[in-house]
Amino acid sequence: MAVEAARAGTSLSLRHEVLRLALRDPFLISRSDHGGGHAATTVVVELRDERHPGLVGLGEGYPDNFYGETPETMAAVWPLLLNALGDPSLGDREDLADASRRMQQAIRWNGAAKCALDIALFDLAGKVSGDPVHELLGLSAEIPPTDFSLGIDEPEVVAQRAERAGAFPALKIKVGGPSDLATLRAVRRVYDKPLRVDANTGWTLDSARAAIPALVDLGVELIEQPFPANRHDWLRALQETSPLPVVADESCVTIDDLETLVGVVDGVNVKLAKCGGVQPAARMLRRARELGFRTFLGCMEETSVGIAASAAVASLADWVDLDGNLLLADDPFGGLTLDGDHRWRLTDAPGLGVARRG
């Protein structure tokens, strides 16, 4: 499906397409509603500026029901966001940053809608100026390697997938199911590098405390979002006694959440689809570092459009989990490649450096 969403009085117009993409392997989390773990629904946009005919900015936003977003809510707010952007000078980095801020100020939530438009704005600006997105943001092309994520399944099935992903420098294992420790032990039998666990709000304080000794023995590197998003009291209690860093994800949506988490967790997971795009993510990662957090950069089950945008800000992260496009059976976009160390290669290509295949 594709529609036009133009706003009178500006030079910008937006076209969007809802993509339902099959996953390479089932990918279940403790609160799965993402196509039952078999498919992902994401939204790709094309942004045009009549002042720069022939150029198209690509963007992507992943609508997550957990944050109250759907493709329909995204389409509903784009006219407002386009109006907030106005007619930014795409060749002026300062004006570009101001345009991104205006969009953030126009509406409180709707991170995926803002994300798609913000990414497209920077991709288009890069094509106008000839600069890659990371340079428009003043960031380095040197980024950490990505881990690879494995969903909840029978322990031996997860272990088989871990063996296939054995070249990655770390694995992120989804937990919060009935066989968490059995799964981690099965994975450890075939994989000897760091493990990261992500409960997606699926644990209780008692279950997390009980698991800590085994997690340490198994060489787990961090614990991501063990508890419901509003249980800061549980997060603080666990972090105070855990030798492993606790990382907030669902508890940390935008930059406004950071100060409430000081002294509660050691790390925060920033995602473009939560906070609203490349410019908000860069600001959020910088602020997180100022506040003393360790920084984790995550993703959704996105195409190479969303992953390339995330990679553009990855130099600000301590840990990187940018594997969404690798989870897809068929990524409709190309141009983004992993190097031998499993780092996404940021090139000098203008904008994101990705394009639709075929």
Image (cartoon, rainbow, N blue to C red):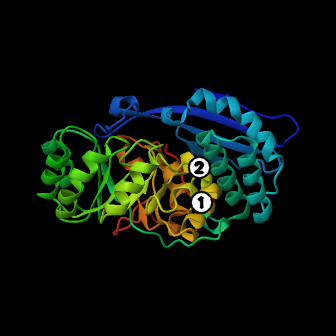
- Of residues 251 and 29, the one drawn nearer to the viewer in this rendering: 251
Identify the amino acid type marked 2: Cys
- Residue 347, percent from left and from top: 53, 67
Does the rendering let one see residue 135?
A: yes
- Mark-to-mark CA distance, 1 and 2: 8 Å
* Residue 72 horizontal/vertical position (percent): 61, 26
- The residue located at (67%, 65%) in the rendering is 136
- Quarter of the image that includes the N terminus: top right
Q: Which residue is mark 1?
A: 284
Q: In the displayed structure, does residue 176 sit left or right of residue 76?
A: left
Per the image, label 1 sits on a secondary structure element best described as helix
**Three-letter amino acid code at disc 1?**
Met
Residue at screen point 61% across, 55% down: 255
Residue 218 occupies which quadrant of the picture?
bottom left
Give the residue at mark 2: 275
- Residue closest to the eye, 92 or 217: 217
**Which residue is at a point 69% across and 51% down the rendered structure image?**
121
Tell me if I can see residue 190 in this picture. Answer: no
- All told, the count of numbered labels is 2
